[in-house]
Every structure is written in C-alpha cells, then in structure tokens.
Image (cartoon, helix red, strand yellow):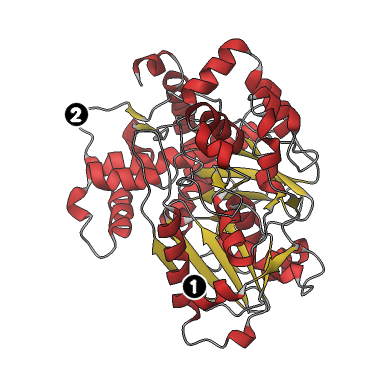
Amino acid sequence: MYVGLDIGTSMIKAALFDATGQEIASAGQRVALREAPIGWSELDAETMLAAVRGTLEALLDGRDQRALRAMGITGVMVGACLLDASGRVLRPPILWNDARAQSLVDDLVADKPDLFSDIFSGSGSQMQLGCILPVLAWLKAHEPQHIDAARHVLCIKDYVRYWLTGTIATDESEAAMAPGSASARDFDARQAERLGVADLVPLLPKVERGETLAGQVTAQAAAVTGLPEGLPVAIGTGDVSASVLGIGCHAPGQAATVLGTTCLNGVLFDEPVFEPEAGLLFIVPGDLWMRTMVNVAGTTTLDWALQALCPDITAGTDPYADLGAMAETAPAYSRGVIFLPYLSASGVIAPRVEPRARAGFFGLAPHHDRAILVRAVYEGLAHAVRHCFADIGSDLSVIRLSGGGARSPFWTQMIADAVGVPVEVSRGTEFGAKGAALCAATSVGDFASVREASRVAFALQRRHEPDPRAHAGFEEAHQAYRIAVTAGLGPLTALTR
C-alpha cells in the first residue's frame, strides 16, 4: 500500500492506495487559518503538524504497517515557511493566497512597467502575490529580523516532508512557480533580481524530481504519526500537478479541470508553452507541462451562495446537495441572469490579471428569485471553464474533472453542456493524495515511470456526454457572459477596493 498526504489550505487529508492505485481509505482534519490583518493568510505550524499527526493516526489505525511500501506528499504551493539553522520555524508559514505584498509589487511595477511580462517570459505564469519571491521581498522589507535568522525557506508541504524525514528539498513545480524557470524546471536567479531578493537565493532549497526519493521517515516522526520508521518518502509535487496525475492525465493533449477552492483548467504538453501571456504553467512529473487558465474562485462560490443566499439550509445534513437541488428547480440559463464568478479578494488572473476584479450578478429583474440566482452561480463557473479552455486554444476531446465540484453530477453535466465536450470523473475522492502516492510508487520502482503509474491507476466513475440542445442554449448565454466579463474587468473595477 502507498500513503498520499495532502496539505491543503484549510484541510489536511491522507489516503491509502493499493498496488494498482485504487483508493482504500482516507482521513482528514481541518485547520484554522490566520487571516488578520485583511489580506493575510497564514497557518500556525504546530497546529498544522498536530492535524497531520491526527490525520495519519486515523488513517493507519488498526492497519498493518508492514504492508506500507512508500509515501508521497503534496499540498498547496508557494508561500513561505522560514526555518533557522536548527530547523525551527521562525514565524507562522505564509500561504499561497496571501496578498500582503500588493503595495510592494505595485511599487516595483511603477519602477519597472514590464516586470510582470519579464517574469512571465521565464516562468510561463502570472505571478501571484503569495509566490515565494514576492513574499520574501515583503519579509525582507518588513521583518528583517526573521530574514537575518533564516537559513531555509520552504513551501508548506516541503516543511512537512522535512519534519518527517529531515530532508531539505523542493520539487520542480514549486521552483518554477517561485517564480522561476519553466524551461529549466528550476529556480532562476534572474527572477530573484527582478523582485529585489537576489541576496536571498541561498535560502532556496535544492530541487528534485517529484517521482524520486527524498528520504525515510525518522524514528522521531514515526513515534508521533504511526508511520513505520524507515518508510520511503518521495519528493512529491504541488497539489495541482498531483491532482492531474491522480485523475489519470499523463499524456500531451489531455485536458483537466480541478474544480476545488480554485477553478483550474489546463491542457498537458510535452514542452513549455508560453502563450497566451496569461494564466499559469505548471510543471507535472513525467517531463510534462500544463498550460492552465484559472478562475481564482471555484467551489468557494458555493460556500458564499450557501451563507449569503441560503442560510436556512446550512444546518441540513447535506447543504451542498440541497443547494444543487434548488438550482435544478430553476430554468436553464437562469432566465438571462449571469453570475461573474470573480469572488476572490485577489481578483482574477485569467483572462487577465486584475486584482480589483469582483463578482456580480448581471441582468437581474424583479421576477428573478433566489433559485435562479443559485443556478446562475453554478452556470457562472461553467462559463468560466469554457472561457479558460478557449483562451488556451487547444482542441479538446474530453475533460477529466476532479475536486469538490466533481461530486455533483448536476454540475459536471452542466460543464459538459457548456463546453461541448465529454466530461469524465475518475473513481475515488482524494486525487491530490493519489498523485503523491503515484510519485511514491514510482520512486521505489513499482512503476517504470510516473506516466505509467497514472495510466494504470485511472478508473472511470462516470462520463457525461454534452447534450446538443443544452449546448446550443449555452452558446447564446455564453455571449452574454463574455459581455459581463468585459464590464467586470472594465471601469467597474475602479469602484471596488
């Protein structure tokens, strides 16, 4: 059996997989974020490690440790966890969705108007404020005492791996997103120079392939987790790349949508693709790259809809199922109501970077009720998926979809109808953990390559064929959606802060 550990933004999850990559069991535990002042996003390191211990103990309770072959780790990317010379965490780790560096980056852009374009030319990604280098720039300016004491900077999943094995390292996906070099699949000193942190390059860890071994579980970690001492631990990869492998995407031309906290849509390539100059370029183990366009708010739009529109159903046994059932009662295309799903404090990074972009309903009339508004929220994300894939520009034959949104057949069928291509949902629930486990299985030689591991482990749960009549209806609605996007990214953004 293989263990996959997934360090999420607010949830620690772990799962067990058999020799063919099929999910056997899973466990999880929530962790609270530190989100003050507004725009900050941090985790308490000890609280997070306690959740890791609790999750692993629950997963392994009553199981034969001798059956475990290897372990892989994935999790949210970038951010910064500073360690001193003894490996002690110097301050609460900063996460990917932290926006404290906004004013610093604004000042850099004022001095270097081509900054974002220059960064994209190397990384293939629109730099987010929570990336490693801008966070380091902020810490250098505002917390120099921590920078002076730091000897290493790790992403949160890499810190957990260090805690388990004592190995300081990161993987190619993190290095390229730092921002770094997508072509070299590594950090890039020129990017550090652009962001004023060239002197901090020595803090960055060594970069290893995700499907290689990092080390073994130490006696100290084994004593508090239930893992066997000496269990091989793979380097692993970022959560997006792990999910892509976990749902069975392993070859150029395959398309994936991860409909989780964010709504990420991408196509695999066997070389780095730098067009369009928008979105993100992820490094995927197996010498693959994924050109992606991302709507920063994914299933968080449903969280908002529950609290803001339907607080009366939040106490039910399955409020999300009730929300979907309410949406199904409303007519398709929401009687002309369009929801623009830019429901994130950081705005959008696709179809262009606009930190001040905000969500909104367009086309409201007195006869529209809340069921229509709820359906418009679901349809808004379906339109966003279509928009993102259109901007990538590749012909699609099928989309493999994962994340919390994949649990709703109503929503996945809607996405198939909106985009006009079949949508496949893989069997299982923890695809990030599965991708990490496949890296682990490859690292100990149980698969010839991580591509083979992903291919062998794919199992179809259901497939949604697009309905021609529904797709024709979405054609007209999508034109209205594009008009709303133009408005939402235009002068209206000047009114929002």
Tell me which amino acid carries mark 1: Leu
Q: Secondary structure at mark 1?
A: helix
**Measuring 61% from the left and 50% from the top, which residue is drawn there?**
85
Please state which of residues 431 and 331 is positioned toward the viewer in this rendering: 431
Judged left or right of residue 428, residue 120 is right
Q: Are marks 2 and 1 in contact (CB under 8 Å)?
A: no
| Quarter-of-image position of residue 27 | bottom left
Whole-angstrom CA distance, mark 2 to mark 1, is 52 Å
Q: Which residue is mark 2?
A: 366
Against 424, residue 191 (above or below) is above
The outermost residue toward the left is 312
> Closer to the camera: disc 2 or disc 1?
1
Question: Can residue 40 be seen by looking at this rendering?
Answer: yes
**Measuring 76% from the left and 49% from the top, which residue is drawn there?**
288
Please state which of residues 444 and 246 is positioned toward the viewer in this rendering: 444
Residue 279's x, y, as percent?
61, 33
Against 393, residue 323 (above or below) is below
**Measuring 48% from the left and 43% from the top, which residue is drawn there?**
94
Q: Residue 431 got which mark? A: none
**Measuring 64% from the left and 28% from the top, which residue is drawn there?**
197
Q: Which residue is mark 1?
A: 56
Density class for disc 2 (Cα within 10 Å; few <14, some 14-19, many ≥20) is: few
Q: Secondary structure at mark 2?
A: loop
Judged left or right of residue 326, residue 355 is right
Tell me which amino acid carries mark 2: Pro
**Number of numbered discs visible in the structure rendering:** 2
Of callouts 2 and 1, the N-terminal one: 1
Residue 171's x, y, as percent?
70, 51
Q: Quadrant of the C terminus?
A: top left
Residue 482's x, y, as percent?
49, 26
